[in-house]
Amino acid sequence: DNGYDLWLKYQKIENKALLNTYKNTLNSISFTGNTATLNAAKEEIVRGLSGLLNHEYTISKAVASTNALIIATKEHIDSQFTEQLKNDFTQLKKNGFIIKSITKKNRKYTIITSNDELGVLYGVFNFLRLIQTHKSINDLHIVDAPTIDIRLLNHWDNLDRTVERGYAGESIWNWHKLPDFIDQRYIDYARANASIGINGTVLTNVNSNALILTPQYMEKVTALANVFRPYGIKVYLTARFSAPIEIGGLSTADPLHKEVQQWWNDKAKEIYSQIPDFGGFLVKANSEGQPGPQNYGRNHVDGAKMLATAVAPYGGIVMWRAFVYSEHDTDDRAKQAYTEFVPFDGQFPDNVIIQVKNGAIDFQPREPFHPMFGAMPKTNVMMEFQITQEYLGFSTHLVFLPKLYQEVLSSDTYVKGKGTTVANVIDGSLHTKKITAMAGVANIGSDFNWTGHPFAQANWYGFGRLAWNPHLSAKEIADEWLRSTFSNKDEFVEPMTDLLINSRETVVNYMTPLGLHHIMDTNHHYGPGPWVSNLSRPEWNPVYYHKADSLGIGFNRSTDGSNAVSQYSKELKTIYNNLESCPEELLLWFHHVPWNYKLKNGDTLWNNMALTYQKGVNEVAQMEATWKMMEPYVDNQRFQEVNMLLKIQLKEANWWKNACMLYFQQYANLPFPNGMEKPTKSLKYYQSLKFPFAPGIRPQWD
Ligand code: BDP
């Protein structure tokens, strides 16, 4: 099994009793409707049930006398069921669905319905998930709908098919062959996304290329939009701020300049004439060398307004990123986005949403949530997670990211008192927002299995599930994914759910324990590089983040340090500011701590650091051992692949531990504690390792 089918395997159910129960309940399928979206739903239910139940289904409109599965939008549901569905329909939100078992005069029916066609498609995928995960379908009553409006992938894909921070081959967009060649992968991509509720995709890198907006490329984008439309997926593009100069022949891109505004208005008109449901633009402006309004003495509001005005007549939106930090600003990098954006609260138009990374630095294995969440009550604010593992061992290491996402989403902002979580900010319930959205930087590439590591598929899956409902638990997601992707056997699902759930903390343990961050090696961000200190911008150097010296280690962001703690609500500020109350997992994020400082377990910081690194290594060894026992439940190809990858992960966990501990020992000047395996190589050796051809490197980065 090469993994291409993702979680949509629809493998025949081996358990005879279960198979028969399903078959009995689903004797026939009645399906009404013949539009592109409903046909996609029809194809999927036939494909899914034929595979799972190993039974050839013919579809008809007629409703069989009993044990029928009935699929239709509300207006086409047989009137005999109207009464039983009435209450459900009154609660049903946009794109939501009802799955209900109804018994009438001893006759049993299972109904999948919705107010809209997309809801029917989502209902079908949900129903198939129930069967794939061997749930009972005897007495169903599910009314579900997405909690967040816009659920997007962000592809950091370049037009030459390289993928920035992509570790799974080339870009899946074959720009050269588009628009005439439609790869089957595009259709399967859309199916996979629809199955988890993703409804938008930004096709191009945030470090953007204006060429995508030329007619030659727009034809290609249009072809993709046509493939995705039946699956409810809208296409978005990154807008290069200087496009009016680069492809429009203007002399300026000043957002207050009439000609520039007109250029964008015309561009939007041209795009919408080809893609009437075009989603809008994603913009990285005045960040890491990208052009933006500040190049013309204007601000983020001016820039966002101009683009928002251009797409507003067609219902488009602008996602304006808050990932900014300046080479001229000497303030703590963690503070800069908040400082720059929060004063603009209330000034952005309604069709603008500010896209904020989950943490204030950059997709680290662990960061406190970004203080901008909850701090802009009058502005639409959306979440940006990274699915691709730029700072988490690429697609070489097994890390289950839904655990990280869940930690962020369930973090308490205290903005309106205890219990007001980041998820409440994102789903709009806290401040009643006009638009709600969540984006994930995609980990998809041209590899057979889409994501490189077979388990990296779980991160794509889990992102989609949490974008649909940010209150889901990571454990539930792990369970669903394992059952759909590998096996329903308890002997497999139980240990593997634990393995997935623990894998995130394991990576933190062997990479950046106790609140350490950004100590990865230069440019590629693979492997340790805590010693790097020679890059042109101070905040690109790991030494800027860990600040190890003879006294201790960590970034003092307390009130007597950079004061980043003050960007959080009062309650959190107090918790983070105080060394005793600061959660130990974030200690070195907020404090510069003496090497001999005693942690809660009574041992020193130095010893705790050493033993946590070691714990991470031991946990990977345990993951490897657990996986070995899974051989009976997994196909040979994926079994071997994961086996090899876990071996690499173990080697590299040791590399992290040894390199970091040797390096920090120079400052701590303390012996390694008992329980930490001593490095066999020197610090010099680790410092000599170079990775000039690591995948996903961003070419313009030094
Ligand atoms: C950083 C990446 C860089 C991205 C940047 C961004 O290293 O490749 O361009 O984020 O999000 O993490 O814009």
Image (cartoon, grey):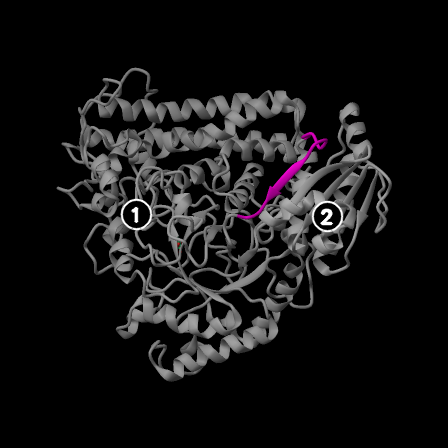
Viewport quadrant of the C terminus? bottom left
Q: Answer above or below: position of 245 versus 21.
A: below
Residue 67 location (% of width, % of height): 82, 36
Q: Nearer the viewer, mark 1 or mark 2?
A: 2
Q: Answer above or below: position of 49 versus 212.
A: above
* Mark 2, other Cα within 10 Å: few <14 / some 14–19 / many ≥20: few
Check whether the beta carbons of the residues at disc 1 and disc 2 lie within 8 A of each other: no
Q: Answer above or below: position of 269 versus 112.
A: below
Asked if residue 54 lies left or right of residue 411, the reply is right
Q: Which residues are magenta?
A: 134-146
Residue 291 location (% of width, % of height): 35, 68
As helix, strand or loop, the secondary structure at mark 2 comes to helix
User: Between 297 and 689, which is closer to the camera in this rendering?
Assistant: 297
| Residue 9 seen in the figure | no
Residue located beneath label 2 in the image = 82
Q: In the image, is residue 137 part of the stretch drawn in magenta?
A: yes
Q: Give the Cα separation between the discs numbered 1 and 2.
A: 48 Å
* Mark 1, other Cα within 10 Å: few <14 / some 14–19 / many ≥20: many
Residue at 34% over, 58% down? 378
Labels 1 and 2: the sequence-earlier one? 2
Overall secondary structure of the magenta stretch?
Answer: loop
| Residue 345 seen in the figure | yes
Residue 184 location (% of width, % of height): 70, 55
Name the amino acid, label 1: Pro
Name the amino acid, label 2: Thr
User: Between 644 and 575, which is closer to the camera in this rendering?
Assistant: 575
Residue at 71% over, 45% down? 83
User: Between 637 and 597, which is closer to the camera in this rendering?
Assistant: 597
Residue located beneath label 1 in the image = 371
Residue lying furthest top: 674
Q: Which mark is residue 269?
A: none
Residue 360 location (% of width, % of height): 31, 48
